[in-house]
């Protein structure tokens, strides 16, 4: 009964790196980039960067440079060349001629969850032509979400899964569980309701009435 990592007959926490830390590291970078106290502080992003896309994500969220440890340890320095290639191609495609041209670009659109629009609504849509009838979306929605997917049987015995639009709450669990790319999409809905953040929502008991 000694957990890992093991040092002699003892264990401790630590040694976290690679994809396991990427979301945490990205949040840290974004938090610094959008803090009014540090708007121009140079940031070097690190934690789980192993592709050019990871690097681009860190840069868009505020990094001016990125560092790579685990990916280089696992694949050698060559992986950095591949990342440079991929990033250069993507930048050319998007018309960015320098890192500064897109560093922090995603920051104005990054906020605390309480400032998001509580009236924003999406509904799942299944592309029947792409569906392979595996039923994963049905089980996910039926067992742990809002029972919003109907399981139908066609005359020829084939299964068909359909979203019950009035019941769908847009949690996107079905989209995450679907093994076929682009088979389930989340479609934004026109609700006719105004923007409402949680800090102004009458249902929020801690709301400071304006
Ligand atoms: C095998 C290994 C040993 C590491 N040793 C150290 C260390 O002694 N001191 C340190 O500051 N960082 C060390 N790191 C780096 C960080 O713990 C961590 O991996 C890095 O900050 C995250 O970036 P990455 O996901 O690109 O690895 C080590 C990383 C690995 C993979
Ligand atoms: S988005 Fe959520 S509620 Fe809607 S069908 Fe998918 S799993 Fe069910
Ligand atoms: S998870 Fe995707 S492929 Fe499987 S039944 Fe649902 S929509 Fe079809």
Image (cartoon, rainbow, N blue to C red):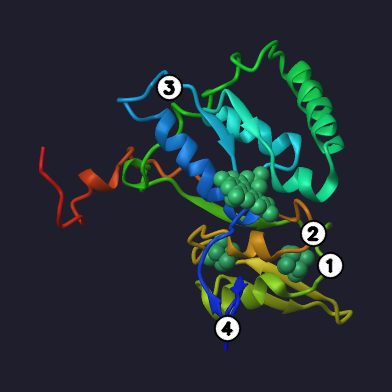
Provide the residue designation for mark 1: 132
Q: Which mark is residue 41?
A: 3
Q: Earlier in the sequence, mark 3 or mark 2?
A: 3
Distance from the alpha carbon under mark 3 to that under mark 2: 42 Å
The residue carrying mark 2 is: 180
Residue appearing at x 77%, y 43% in the figure: 72
**Label annotation for residue 2:** 4
Mark 3–mark 4 distance (CA, rounded to whole Å): 42 Å
Q: Is mark 2 within 8 Å of ligand 3?
A: yes
Q: Nearer the viewer, mark 4 or mark 2?
A: 4
Give the SS element for disc 4: loop
- CA gap between label 1 and label 2 equals 8 Å
Disc 3, SS: loop
x, y (%) of residue 134?
Answer: 79, 73
Which quadrant holds residue 173? Answer: bottom right
Q: Residues within 10 Å of mark 2 (few under 14, many from 20)?
A: few
Q: Are marks 3 and 1 in contact (CB under 8 Å)?
A: no
Mark 1 or 4 closer to N-term? 4
Q: Earlier in the sequence, mark 4 or mark 2?
A: 4
Cβ of mark 1 under 8 A from ligand 3: yes
């Amino acid at each position: 009964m000694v957990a890992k990592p093991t040092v002699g007959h003892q264990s401790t926490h630590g040694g976290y790196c690679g994809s396991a830390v990427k979301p945490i590291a990205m949040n840290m970078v974004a938090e610094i980039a959008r803090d009014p106290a540090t708007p121009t502080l140079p940031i070097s992003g690190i934690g789980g960067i192993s592709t050019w896309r990871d690097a681009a994500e860190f840069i868009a969220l505020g990094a001016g440079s990125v560092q790579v440890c685990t990916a280089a340890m696992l694949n050698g320095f060559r992986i950095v060349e591949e990342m440079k290639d991929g990033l250069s191609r993507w930048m050319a495609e998007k018309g960015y001629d320098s890192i500064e041209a897109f560093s922090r670009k995603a920051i104005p659109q990054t906020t605390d969850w309480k400032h998001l629009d509580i009236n924003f609504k999406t509904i799942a849509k299944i592309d029947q032509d792409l569906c392979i009838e595996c039923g994963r979306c049905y089980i996910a929605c039926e067992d742990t979400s809002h029972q919003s997917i109907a399981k139908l049987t066609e005359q020829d015995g084939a299964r068909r899964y359909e979203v019950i639009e009035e019941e769908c709450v847009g949690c996107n669990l079905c989209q995450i569980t679907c093994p076929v790319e682009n088979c389930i999409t989340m479609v934004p809905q026109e609700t006719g309701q105004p923007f409402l953040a949680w800090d102004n929502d009458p249902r929020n008991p801690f709301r400071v009435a304006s």
